[in-house]
Image (spheres, rainbow, N blue to C red):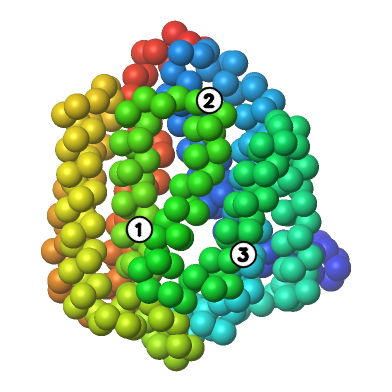
Amino acid sequence: MLSRRQKHILIKFFGLFSVVRGYNILVVVIAQYLASVYIFAPSKTIKSVLFDPNLLMLVLASSATIAAGYIINNFYDSEKDLINKPTKTMLDRLVSQNTKLSFYFVLNFSALVFASYVSFKAVLFFVLYIFAIWFYSHRLKKQPIIGNIVSAILTVTPFFAIFIYYQNFELVVFAHAIFLFLLVSMRELTKDLENIKGDLALNYRTVPVVYGVKISKIMLTIVALFTSATAIALILFFKIGQMYYFFYLSIFLLVVFMVILWKSNTKTHYLILHNILKFIIVAGVFSILLIDISIVLNRI
């Protein structure tokens, strides 16, 4: 049987895990390694990529910075989340604001220590990344359109760190990046529709609050069409192996998304749309394996 103190520590751990969204960070870590093996460094052996200490430090720095970003975002959005996500907020509030802020500084400091192993430029990169996340959470998050764009950029930034490290400037890398950026932009706007109640109550100037639900749906439809066009371009003009199955599935799901979007008028509907986009993003991470399974076996 666990003692009262052990139970308290366990509850705090789950509360903190909820705040930093540990499952999202795990997906990002997997995505960074798969992207490194298949997209950023396809000419290197799997072993040399997986056991590259510099890559490990960049991944750890990214993970620590993202976790810190979730904490500061949770700190500023605590009142809004109480309206939009009451159940999750109950778990998050098991950890005090002082504890959250302490972990925020520890995680950011750890990120810079990890980055310092790679180079001074890596440290500078993560200093700017940490500041950008704070500035977004403190100021830009409440601004329509620019807040969504900055959020999407910050989401794909960890991959940009790996991209700079490997210096792979092939067009296919940018095509994948555009596809991911557009998907994340859609997710951010969908989240705004999902959370409109709390945003209205606390005067967050999001796109649905400022321009209305109809304009938000039109914008989402346009971005969905651009995302589909990017998927088609990846299928037709780039060597992506069996990954074309994923892009065909993505196009189908984006069509489903648009159909449901124009029939949506409740938080539950927007949550379904959010989960569709989340599924496409997570499926995309693991579908990287489909680029060429035989090469993977030969490169071990």
Which amino acid type is marked by label 2? Answer: Tyr
Q: Residue at x 64, y 67 (%)?
A: 72
- Mark pair 3, 2: CA separation: 27 Å
Which residue extends farthest top?
298
Mark 3 is on which residue type? Answer: Trp
**Which residue is at 15% across, 71% downward?**
262
Residue 19 position within the rendered picture, expressed as x and y whole percent measured from the top left: 62, 65
* Structural distance between the alpha carbons of marks 3 and 1: 19 Å
Mark 2 or mark 1, which is nearer to you? 2
Give the image location of residue 213, x and y in percent: 24, 79
Write down the quadrant of residue 298 in the picture: top left
The image position of residue 34, as x and y in percent, is 47, 30
Locate residue 100 relative to residue 24 in the image: left or right: right
Please indicate, yes or no, whether residue 93 appears anywhere in the rendered image: yes
Q: CA distance from mark 2 to mark 1?
A: 26 Å
Between 227 and 147, the residue placed more toward the observer is: 147
Which residue in the structure is indicated by mark 3?
134
Q: What secondary structure is found at the residue carrying circle 2? A: helix
Is residue 91 visible in the rendered image? The answer is no
Task: Tell me the kind of residue under disc 1.
Answer: Ser
Q: Residues within 10 Å of mark 2 (few under 14, many from 20)?
A: few
Task: Please give the residue where the numbered disc 1 appears in the rendered image.
Answer: 185
- Of pointers 3 and 1, the one earlier in the residue sequence: 3
Binning the other alpha carbons within 10 Å of mark 3 as few (below 14), some (14 to 19) or many (20 upward) gives some
Q: Earlier in the sequence, mark 3 or mark 2?
A: 3
The structure residue drawn at horizontal position 32% and vertical position 52%, both measured from the top left corner, is 183
Residue at mark 2: 166
